Amino acid sequence: MTSTPGTAPGTPPGGQSRLRRRAGTAAVAALLLAGIPVGAAVSADAGTPKTATGPQGQKLTVSATTGLDPAQQKVRVQGEGYGLTTGIYVALCKDNGDNRVPSPCLGGADMSGGSKTSQWIVPPGDPYEGDLAQAFGPGGTFDVEIEIAQKGDGLDCAEVACSVVTRADHRAAGDRTQDVRIPVAFAGQDPGDGGGEGVDVPAGTVSYKSAADFTTAGKPLDLLLHPDSKKLYVGADNLPDTADVDERGLHVLNPENGASESWISQAPGSTGALRASAAARIAGPLPGDGVVYNYPLRGVGSAKSGDEAATGVWLAGSTITDIAPGTTPGTVLVAQGATLSEIERATGTATRTLTLPGGTQFAADPERGALWYTDFTAGKLHRVDLASFTVSGSFDLPGGSGGMAGFTETDPATGAVWVGVGRSVLVFDAAGTLVKTLVGKDLARDAAFDTASGRAYVVWQDGGDLSDPANDNNGTLTVYGTEDFAVAAQDLSLPGNHSQAGAASLAVEPGGATVFVTSPAEGKITKLVRQVSPLVIRAPADLTAKDGEAVAIRAEAEGTPEPTVRWQVSTDDAQTWKDVEGATESALTFTARTAQDGYRYRAEFRNDVGTTRTAAVKLTVTPATGGDTGGDVGGNGDASNGSASTGGDGSTGGDGGTQSSGGSTTGDSDSTGGSGSTGTSGGSTGTSDGSGATVGGGVAGGTGPAATSGGGSLAATGATVMSVTLAAAGLVGAGVLVHRRARKRTEGAL
């Protein structure tokens, strides 16, 4: 921070220099990216107050934490025990987890002194004390109100975990010792009781990654994953300058590794003689194995893996522009420009013919007896009734007139027709009503549907002209829900996939676990596999146990790949966490001890996609009632820091045992009897003289109350120290999204 000219750094400006101070704060404001929402505050509190303790003993209390008004809610925030050398912000922020800066935040810093969205608290005598910031009270206390909302300033608490926080101000942005977080939930949400939070990406996030590139099929033009044989059929042209061999034809690949199983390069031409022919479009599968396809210019052929050549017929008329299975076995529907015909594959005879006003491509919907014919030049979509073979309706393609032709495909499940035009996809329902326009940054080139999951896959290709600022040479794969059209997976960049050498095509494995995308310009087929970040399906709940009682905490998550789990424990009210050594199963089992009263536990699930944690649960341990005869020998681990408890030798009376954690020892006993004893654990030694049990292992004796901790617990190791140095960053900033599922998922611990 730059001081006012003519004054020493840190000197509070006064009088007319206050105006200069306001101007000087512009540099700070630029760093803080503040956004101040306006509107009447909702004064009614919701939920109940909640308190949290900070890494340096700070105490933070928020008056309302659940059921908050999404539009705007006023909450009271109180603190005590804060240091008097560091300023803090009080705000609603995205909760990024332990030792990670809470950001972005609602409202940013209050640089005007007039906003209630966030508050700036500074040490007494700070240059900004007064109309910009409020000073701490005695003992590092403060008492403020802030007005929070579910969404604003780049923060959406319906999508990410949010907390009311304190954090160091911009002058100590890398200081995490001031971070105290209290989770909050708006109406309809319930964080802290179930599902868990995504740490790297939202829990249950679907994405795709490249698993392999197949380069064994020349220049791929079209794809079909056969429903029966499961083989990948590729219609291909020759890719110049890649090999001495002419790669045109129908290639059959093993979808697992891309190995070539068959290559049908020959098909009958106009005279019936076999010749090398590309496979331009695949019409559909043959029963069992094989496909029907179009080869240039007017050939209709069929072949299956192992065939030496295709069988086919050569049609009269103009070039075939589209092809699909016919309405009866042995027939195909063929577009030759604006002419639609149904022909017999064996003879090439047209059984029905229809001339439309215009168009070149179509999509058939045999389930509903319809065919959708697209005229990109005129911006029209025609519906053909397949029973009567007549046009039953015509519809406008908004923005489609003269637009770049993309694709026409129908969703088998809903009958909706998806039309790619330029950088948009127009979705019409089965009646021809436009229901959705999807806009991308690249050219819409192909779509495929998975009816099992209700997903539509769209491949967008870059224009390939790098002189155009809109182009970057990279395409995109986008996945949508076919009912709500919401994005159903993270967009995947397809580097180098551009349209200069041909349109990309898609094939989707039923269920959507695998997707194949062609890149004609690169001469490859990219195999993509689905990934899902861990999603908690069974979450633990708070539990109460008696001292010495065996407990089990359980959690489960699903994801792809299968997530691993590790359990973590916090001894300081969820401010810092440590892994429980060896705890990598779905159930964490141990013997509860009084020293663990108030400990919090959570499960952390990981896979290649991300990390998800369950909400922290609290263990309450109550004293055992009465005593048993004989002590425990070789007790169970206490799950406090991966250290095991060692039971005492036993005596007439209650349980005797010690807990080791970083050299500290604890013991407890309800024993009665004679003289004291001496024991050691973790390097420390304790004695007793008949007033209670020993600290450490040994033989309990004496008459008196149960023993207490002999020198600490896991908390004695101190808070985790961060070595992160952050640039001057405001409360509003970029961050990885953290997902909190609104639906409650809880199950009691065993």
Image: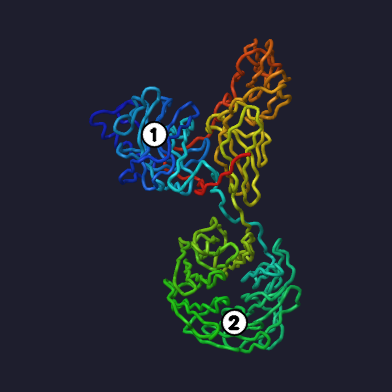
**Residue placed most toward the observer, 473 or 367:** 367
Residue 657 visible, this orientation = no
Task: Name the N-terminal-most of marks 1 and 2.
Answer: 1
**Residue placed most toward the observer, 595 or 33:** 595
Q: What quarter of the picture does the N terminus occupy?
A: top left
Q: CA distance from mark 1 to mark 2?
A: 70 Å
In the picture of the structure, the residue carrying the numbered disc 1 is 77
- Residue 647 percent coordinates (x, y): 71, 23
In the picture of the structure, the residue carrying the numbered disc 2 is 333
Q: What quarter of the picture does the C terminus occupy?
A: top right
Residue 555 visible, this orientation = yes
Residue in view at x 65 percent, y 14 percent: 686
Q: In this rendering, is residue 530 above or below 521?
A: above
Looking at the rendering, which quadrant does residue 387 occupy?
Answer: bottom right
On screen, residue 247 versus residue 79, left or right, reads right
Q: What amino acid type should be assigned to the residue bearing mark 1?
A: Val
Query: In what element is the residue under mark 1?
Result: strand
**Residue placed most toward the observer, 616 or 706:** 706
Q: Residues within 10 Å of mark 1 (few under 14, many from 20)?
A: many
On screen, residue 501 versus residue 102, left or right, reads right
On screen, residue 468 versus residue 506, left or right, reads left
- Residue 41 percent coordinates (x, y): 32, 43
Q: What amino acid type should be assigned to the residue bearing mark 2?
A: Leu
Query: In what element is the residue under mark 2?
Result: strand
